Amino acid sequence: MKHLGIFILGALLLASCATNKRAAYIQQVQTDIPTAIEQDYQIRIKPLDRLTVTINSKDPELAAPFNAASSYNSLNGLSSYSSSSNGNLQILTVDKEGKIQLPIIGEIDCDGLTRNELAKKIENTIRENGMVHDPIVIIQFADVKFSVLGEVARPGQFSITKDRISLFDALAMAGDLTIYGQRENVALIREENGMRTVHYFDLKNPDILTSPYFYLQPVSYTHLTLPT
């Protein structure tokens, strides 16, 4: 199972006593001043990612071969066959060269693309080869999850439902840190390309917003560490 960024590892550091009941984030930041986001930080496809690919058309018979389908669906006037087994979409694994193999279409290079970019690439390939004139491709990540452990309201594992997720998004999904969590000492551990890096956050410092670690990435693990 692929984990996208956040293991809040160990635990959030327990404060010796909770004298301040208010949880403050991003203090002393300049307000009402627009700041450009230098990168889009969308999740990009990498080798060994697992994807589902569904190809739709108004004509289900044309869509069927691309999906190696066994089940028929109709949604918003579009009919499609989904490549499935026991009602579950077939999962394709990106190979080490960053490519997937699709029925009829063949090999598609998807390394570094977003879901939308890969969908457009497949649509264009189908259309340019005269296979289907109205293809609509839906790409989903399979088994992309993150885990939050430690001094949060709802520790556990969560599914990724959008293409960009920040550290604050992940904390919100876990119900936020409790009043005992030490917000000045949050450690993110990222594993990528066989290397592991550790980065500590102070959630009260506005510099967190420009950190390259603020948005989570696949094959990375974020841990909120809380020694007692």
Image (tube, helix red, strand yellow):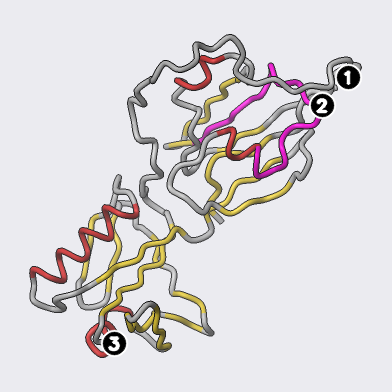
In whole angstroms, how far apart are the C-alphas of marks 2 and 1?
7 Å
Q: Is residue 178 left or right of residue 46?
A: right
- The three-letter code of the residue at mark 3 reads Pro
Question: Is 157 situated above or below 201?
Answer: below
Q: Is residue 186 magenta?
A: yes
Which segment did they paint magenta? 172-191
Q: Is residue 207 left or right of residue 58?
A: right
Front residue of 103 and 146: 146
> Which corner quadrant of the image does residue 19 belong to?
top right
- The three-letter code of the residue at mark 1 reads Ala
In whole angstroms, how far apart are the C-alphas of marks 2 and 3?
54 Å
- In primary-sequence order, the first of circles 2 and 3 is 3
In whole angstroms, how far apart are the C-alphas of marks 1 and 3?
61 Å
**Residue count near mark 2 (Cα–Cα under 10 Å), binned few <14, some 14–19, many ≥20:** some
| Disc 1 target residue | 18
> Are circles 2 and 1 on residues that touch, CB within 8 Å?
yes
> Are circles 1 and 3 on residues that touch, CB within 8 Å?
no
Residue at position x 23%, y 61% in the image? 108
- In primary-sequence order, the first of circles 1 and 3 is 1
> Are circles 2 and 3 on residues that touch, CB within 8 Å?
no
| Disc 3 target residue | 60
Q: x, y percentage for residue 191? A: 51, 35
Residue at position x 26%, y 84% in the image? 65
Q: x, y percentage for residue 138? A: 35, 66
> Which corner quadrant of the image does residue 38 belong to?
top left
Residue at position x 15%, y 63% in the image? 124
The N terminus, quarter of image: bottom right
Q: Is residue 29 left or right of residue 157?
A: left
The C terminus, quarter of image: top right
| Disc 2 target residue | 179
Q: How many marks?
A: 3
**Residue count near mark 1 (Cα–Cα under 10 Å), binned few <14, some 14–19, many ≥20:** few
